[in-house]
Amino acid sequence: MSCPLSAILNDHDEAPQTTPGNASGPSRQRASSREAPFTAPAAFTSTKPQYTSRNRSSFKFSPEKGRLYDRRVRRKLDRVPQLLYLPPSTDLADHYDDMGPPSHELDFNKFSVFNALLSYSELTFEVIKYLEPADLLILYSTSRDFHNLVNTRFTTMILSQSLSKAPESSRIFPFRCYRSLCIRDPAQRANAAKSEFEVRYVPGFQWLQMILFRERTVDEIVACLEKECLMLPQATTLTIKKIWFTIDLPTNALRGSLIRNRDYWTDLDLYLANLFITKLDMLLTCPLTGEGDLGLRKMLLGQRSLATLAAVLKREEMRNEYEMLKMIVAWNYQPTAQQRRLNLPILGVKPKDIGMLQYEGWGANPRVMFHQIDTLVTMESVRRGLDMPRHQLDMVFYGFVDKGPGLDIWTMEQRRRMEEEAEAEAEREVGGDHVGDGARDEVN
């Protein structure tokens, strides 16, 4: 038996709706005869008046005013919620006035993010890793709170900076070997290895600046060689830093002991050191015309620092014969008896510094001459039986010829020139118009 649609739908389209109390008809009478009257308990009955609009009329949904959510968002608060009221009988009432203003009542004109950050030391040391050493030094000198916080963990701050910016140099140049660049621990911690009354040394800002300077200088040396199409493996930077640290040692005994240490100077390091010296000789000499001299390499590696080598490769020093002669005088020039008697500077070099770079301690022991780093590398390679002369031709061809198929390798300079030629050819084909270059567009 089918059910008509009018039996399940309300007749609101044909007649007005009536309230349940006024409902009539057989269905309502049958329901009232079966169901008992329902009365809600007093605990669940609200005594508050029903919500009415401002004009005291009944609440009606107005579709033309938008959704209820949008209307609620556009409404303004008529009053601000009151603060929490604590009865006098509670223990917190005595301390309520000392709790300070809530978060939404803070004076943002006096609020400092940096001072708030200092309250969390671990977060502070993590954030300052991204600061430059110059900015860190200024902050350490001007902020008292930051100064006191860093002094409690000064070593942690310096080492975190060095390990994040120059991890290799931090390991190759340990601060314990550079006492003049260290300071006493600001926290007054004792040196347990010596005496409990002696304050230990910790790395200072000067050591950090030296680490970053040497990291940058080694990269510049490799970049200058690559600019002249003299390629080096990526691991050569670590070997050059080991060369620099060996040069820092003031005596032949220390230099020899270090280079014989297989844990520090590995066989690969000796090979890369020979490769670096070979590429340096190729740069300072010309295989076609025979110009240049191997003595230039010996003089540059005989300086107190590889910073001189980097400055020469960047054309900042030894730009003319006068500067080259001045460097030779400071390195290994032997003044005559008359020049010693007159005790006058030679080419701007002081008498006490003439020819002193070739001796131990850079003149501290003028009776013993230095074993230079290139000589030490060759001696140690022979002692270990590495047979470097057999690999000499491969070192010369490295970066130019692929040893496998025997084909030429395009260097960075050659690639750049090929790209420039391709761009010039493309411009000529389109008649010199720079297609898509808005910076060069002209309005006629």
Image (cartoon, helix red, strand yellow):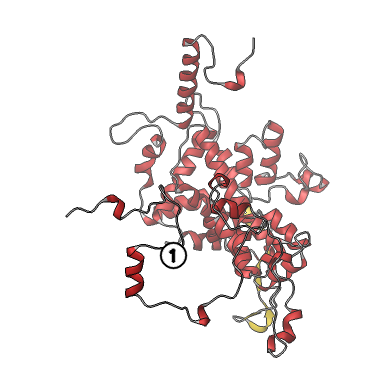
**Percent x, y of residue 39:** 46, 78
Q: Position of residue 286 (x, y in %)?
A: 51, 28
Foreground pick, 89 / 56: 56
Q: Is residue 324 left or right of residue 36?
A: right
Q: Is residue 197 above or below residue 219?
A: below
Q: Amino acid at mark 1?
A: Pro
Q: Which residue is mark 1?
A: 20
> Who is closer to the viewer here, 86 or 144?
86
**Residue at 69%, 89% in the rendered image:** 91
Quadrant where the N terminus is found in the figure: bottom left
Asked whether the viewer can see residue 407, the reply is yes
Relative to 297, does residue 29 appear above or below in the rendering? below
**What x and y, as percent, mark residue 199?**
69, 78
Question: Where's residue 290, x and y in %?
Answer: 51, 27
Residue at 32% across, 29% down? 407
Image point (50%, 63%), residue name: 257
Picture layout, residue 287 above or below residue 389: above
